[in-house]
Amino acid sequence: MAKPTTRQELKDYALRQLGYPVLEINVADEQVDDNLDDALQLFQERHFDGVERVYLKYKVTADDIKRGRARGASESLGITTSTTTSGDFEENTNYLTVPDSVIGIEKVLLFDSSFISNNMFSFKYQLFLNDVAFNLGYSGLLSYAMTKTYLEDIDFLMTTNKQIRYNKRNNRLYLDVDWGSVTEGTYIIIDCQRIMDPANYAGVYNDSFLKKYFTSLVKRQWGQNLIKFQGVKLPGGTELNGRQIYEDGVMELQRIEDRMLSTYEVPPLDLIG
């Protein structure tokens, strides 16, 4: 099938591209599965079509607050102690366990501690109410937009951003905030990048990059399996050349990866001093 929509269809597609069933592809099913997992991992971690931006909502529990708050020396709750040869080092367990599908976190929208909040008694609400009722019809939208921009500048200077730390390999989102001011039941919004799971998005299997990359991985594996049979004569005078298949697969992978770096991967932002 030229447009695979399942894992098995993609595997069959790659084998056909290598010559099956005309040729016998000397690769075990387990090896094909391993190569497909490797191809999916690279696609999800490096390709811009391998992730999607989502907002995840999380409700803070009492256990989260207890774990995040630093305790005194007599209490070990919320503290992880690591003993080394040079002494004891303590680390606060102020983290939330993030789903494994999350590959990167942009920011966290926590409780609003700004004086320009969104409730009825906030400065923003009263200013908007006053402008709509009296001034908006006289001063126009320009004056109102300039005032809102000025307030946002004040908010940016007076309200510090919540500091977070996250690493994909441990799935822990560290929130460096005052957990004593966090109340149970508070919702936080996580602005993150989530992988495109082919179990939920069948179109992943039909991605042009993934199909080519996976096929080249299987080709390299095929050559790797046949390298030790270099020069072996088959019935009819055919000679195996596993090393050539292996080297062709390596060269194809290198070209595909180079193109991904220049075409499919989101470039890092420039550092402006």
Image (cartoon, rainbow, N blue to C red):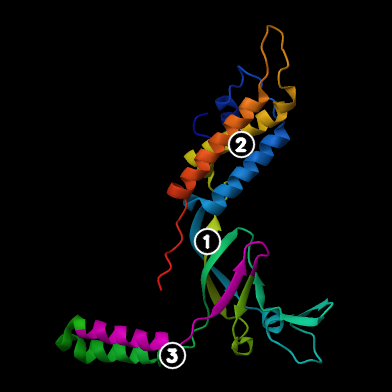
Task: Determine the residue positioned at 52% across, 44% down.
Answer: 257
What amino acid is labelled 2 in the image? Leu
Which numbered marker is on residue 217? Answer: 2
Give the residue pinned by disc 3. Answer: 158
Sequence-first tag of 2 and 1? 1
Where residue 190 sits in the image (x, y, percent)?
53, 70
134 or 78: which is nearer to us?
78
> Image check: 91 left or right of 134?
right
Give the structural element (helix, strand or loop) at label 3. Answer: helix
Which mark is first along the chain, 1 or 3?
Answer: 3
Relative placement, left or right, of 82 versus 106 is right
Q: Secondary structure at mark 1?
A: strand
Chain part drawn in magenta: 143-172
Q: Nearer the viewer, mark 2 or mark 1?
A: 2
Q: Amino acid at mark 1?
A: Gln
Cα gap from disc 3 to disc 1, whole angstroms = 29 Å
Which residue occupies 54% across, 67% down? Answer: 105
Kind of residue sitting beneath label 3: Met
* The quarter of the displayed image where residue 171 is located: bottom right
Q: Quadrant of residue 153?
A: bottom left
Q: Quadrant of the C terminus?
A: bottom left
Up/down of 269 relative to 219, above or below:
below
**Which secondary structure, mark 2?**
helix
- Place of residue 145 in the rendered image (x, y in percent of width and height, measured from the top left): 25, 82
Determine which residue is flagged by label 1.
Answer: 193
Residue at the location (55% across, 63% down)? 104
Q: Position of residue 35 (x, y in %)?
A: 65, 39
Q: Earlier in the sequence, mark 2 or mark 3?
A: 3
In this rendering, which labeled residue sits more in front, label 3 or label 1? 3
